[in-house]
Amino acid sequence: MKRKSTYGLLVLLAISLGTVAQSKKKVSFVGGARSLMTNNQLLVTDSLPDTTSVKRNSGGYALIDLGVNIKPNDNTEILGMFRIKNDYGGFWGAGVNFDVRQLWLKGIIAKKVRYQIGDINLKQTPFTLYNHQADRLDDLPEVFGMQSRVVDYEKFYRRNTWRQQGANVDFALNFSKYVKEVNFNGYMLRLGASNFASIPDRLMGGATVGVQITDDLYVGYNRASVFDVKGTVADSNTFHNNVNTINAKYTKAINKNTLTVRAEAGKSLSCQTFDTLAPELTDYFINASASFEVPKIKTTFTLGYLNVGPDFRSIGAQSKAINYGNRPVLYGRYTNAQAARSLSLLDVIADDGLYNRSINPQMAQYNQGYNIVMPFGMATFNRNGIYARVAHKTENYSVRAETYLLSEIRGMGTTALRNMAQHKLNASVNLNNYLKTKNKFKMHAGLNIQTSKRTGASLGNVDFKRNIITAGLQYELFKNMEILGGLTMLSAKGTEFTEDRNDYEEVTYFNQTNYDNQQRLLGGGLKYNFTDKIYLSAYYQSIQNQLANQADYTINQFGILYNMTF
Amino acid sequence: MKKYLLLLSIPFVIFSCRKDNLVEGPNIDDLLGEFGITEAFKADRDTVNFANGENVLFTAKFNKLTDWEIHITGQNSGAKKVMSGQSREINASNGTWEGSTTDLPFFKAENCDAELIIPDITDTYTESVEVRAPKTNAGFLLSDFESGVFDPGWTKFVQTGADMDWGIKNDASGSPEKNHYLNMAGTVSWDWLIGLLDFNATAYGANTFPLSSNADNEYFNCLLYGEAGNNESVILFQFKEDENSDGTFNETNEDMYALEVRVNWEGWQLVSVKYSDLTALENGQPATPKGNGVHNPDKLGIVSVLDLADPAQGFASTRIDYLIFTQNNALQP
């Protein structure tokens, strides 16, 4: 039945295309294709030999995303994209899935107001609507980066946007006096549908009014509001989360250098209308930074202050891309007891099933082993402190360093506050420039250290450290053929506390956790670039995961990945 | 330049103060700390007369937030009172015993043992209290059968079945309150009815019982005993109103509300019902009242207790005691 209806759609699409083509309107095809084949091996180190888990696994899929971009007139553009996916090993038809991957319509009204309806990629500011991707690893070696970009493609992660369904309009007004330009952007999204029993329709609406006062100064007002639609269930209690912010950017040239000051401050309210047990949370945040760009030394210095209140809630900015509640697709259970397998770096990098496509209205779980300092990015609540960045880039190499020194504002289970720090250092070198070879030869390395410490809390003392080290190389053996290598290591050690929260997101319990986790992800492979958008790669990677309270394991994977976009 | 800086500083001024709670969530020391008792568990008196309005105050102090329970057990009656809480201290707000019972029977004049129980702590903390007079309950008592005989103003009918044992028993150890209860047992193979007892208001000196007119404030309570292994008893309570105040109940044009209780448990249990929650029943099914359809507890003239059982299932046995009307709340035994 599903296939019949899909064929019907395709026929309808073909007829429509024919009609459009005949009327000489512009039609173009966009999309992509991908094929992935993997062969996996699981090794378990346990006190009892694991005789129940299947150790060998092979599989994969081939898919094509075929999008038709139609411009029936100069002011209208329509995109419909189908996906046909076939899992390897599935019998013809049984393993084939047809889906509508995206559908949107956009255009311009009266040459002034732009609009888009259907699937939309949206972001506002880091505290209103923003996909922080807080746990994604920076500067992954290309051998892992290929897989990470597949996740981005699958989930529509583009420049910190969230993929939502709804409508969006924007327009601008130019002025000859007082201000240069006023930009308006408004949107309305549907976050969740009612089940007509207990879950109401939940919408998100927002707006940004940006005023470009002069070429140097911009001031904007931003609002993001999540709310239940009254009447979509019998219960008249409704949830609201409103965030209002003001942001500004000021740029000033000082000699040949540039000073840029950015600031955003705002307030949130999170409440339920009739549930007397539900707390009303209201709080504010401030984020301000000054950047000083010195072209002469190709370096930019940034110093900032961050203060996000413990009760600051912003669903649009505090949704996490990764859902740690999901189980990995590969070897979800292991050991004789069929225990749930803890996520590893390999899963976090490559398993798109772990990631959310759109905003999740509930407070997301976070994993201290991956990110304890800012699990919700800059919008992480209960943080106060300073940060600094230095970025230096030449043709031959680049170096970026970043430090966050933060502390809690409100104690968690004790009046003593945690002090947290994150230090990042990433460097890359184009060795071919030094070696004077034509073949590309790039190496890079990164270090990410997070610490959390709480003293003077007696039984609540905390001492935790998490390191991630990455190193990678990319060498062009001959034209378009690259050899890839990469190493990523994670260690998490120490004592921390995780909190249990109730339905109102109030903390009800603290669980003391002793971490002793060592992970090592090693990979290597070959990649042939047909064009910038088409490549074929064969790779091998191995993750070793040593855990404190669970059986250690190793997963070895050989994969062939073909990817193209058009 | 100055005006721009002034503009940029506005948000900082707006949001410059925050009303902070210092701590969020439960205290970690309370969650993880080792339990210790800093002030011994004790009762403020050795003897108590609950009938005179006296109470027993239990006190103790702990070094952390603690889940605790106090179990008070009557040495003779086996009655049990349980008080529980989560606190750093047991005091007047959470450790006062006014003589009430959690598990029937009622406490009697007897020695009681009080034990403080802390989960996962094996140490025992005990106290003893002598109850000189048990708690009395406010309300209109239909009967606790303590006279040992049926009041001549009541109406009694008992079938002549087999193994009939339908009468007032003097059994101090088996009675939930004082010494007597009404035993209702027997085999009637031809009828659901084994026996009935009408409590006529006239037996108490008036045509109606001394209840208020507010049906939401009046509660009927009694104690019922279930026995394992016997045919299930069904106790049907009927509340017959004399709406026209002529001194008699006319079933064709006056309200009769009912409560049917299937005695499918073991031991004594409190049964309580708000008068306004009573419904008219006909053959066990909800029906339209025959009178004005208004619950009028102040016009209640007869309370009937019908002891029923399936005639095909043989011997049935149950007990009843302490039938009492209370105001504002169900009986707190």
Image: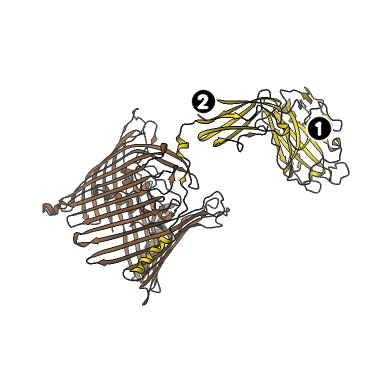
Chain colours: A brown, B yellow
Kindly report the distance in space between the C-alpha atoms of the residues bearing marks 2 and 1. Answer: 51 Å
The chain letter under disc 2 is B
Q: Is residue A156 visible?
A: no
- Identify the residue position indicated by label 2 in the image: B122
The percent coordinates of residue B281 (x first, y second) are 75, 41
Query: For the residue marked with disc 1, what is the amino acid?
Result: Leu
The percent coordinates of residue A225 (x first, y second) are 46, 59
Q: In screen coordinates, is A140 left or right of B141? A: left
How many C-alpha atoms fall within 10 Å of the one at disc 2: few (<14), some, or many (≥20)?
few
Number of numbered discs present? 2
Q: Quadrant of the N terminus of chain B?
A: bottom left
Q: Is residue A162 visible?
A: yes
Q: Secondary structure under badge 1?
A: strand
The percent coordinates of residue B148 (x first, y second) are 81, 25
Depth check: give the residue in front, B328 or B136: B136
Depth check: give the residue in front, A391 or B167: A391
Q: In screen coordinates, is A520 left or right of B13? A: left
Q: Quadrant of the C terminus of chain B?
A: top right
Residue A487 badge: none
Query: For the residue marked with disc 2, what is the amino acid?
Result: Thr
The picture quadrant where one finds residue B39 is top right
- The answer to whether mark 2 and mark 1 are in CB contact below 8 A is no
Tell me which numbered mark, 2 or 1, is placed earlier along the sequence.
Answer: 2
How many C-alpha atoms fall within 10 Å of the one at disc 1: few (<14), some, or many (≥20)?
some
Q: In screen coordinates, is A7 left or right of A442? A: right
Task: Examine the rendered structure and indicate whether residue A332 appears above or below residue A316.
Answer: above
- Identify the residue position indicated by label 1 in the image: B197
The percent coordinates of residue A557 (x first, y second) are 27, 41
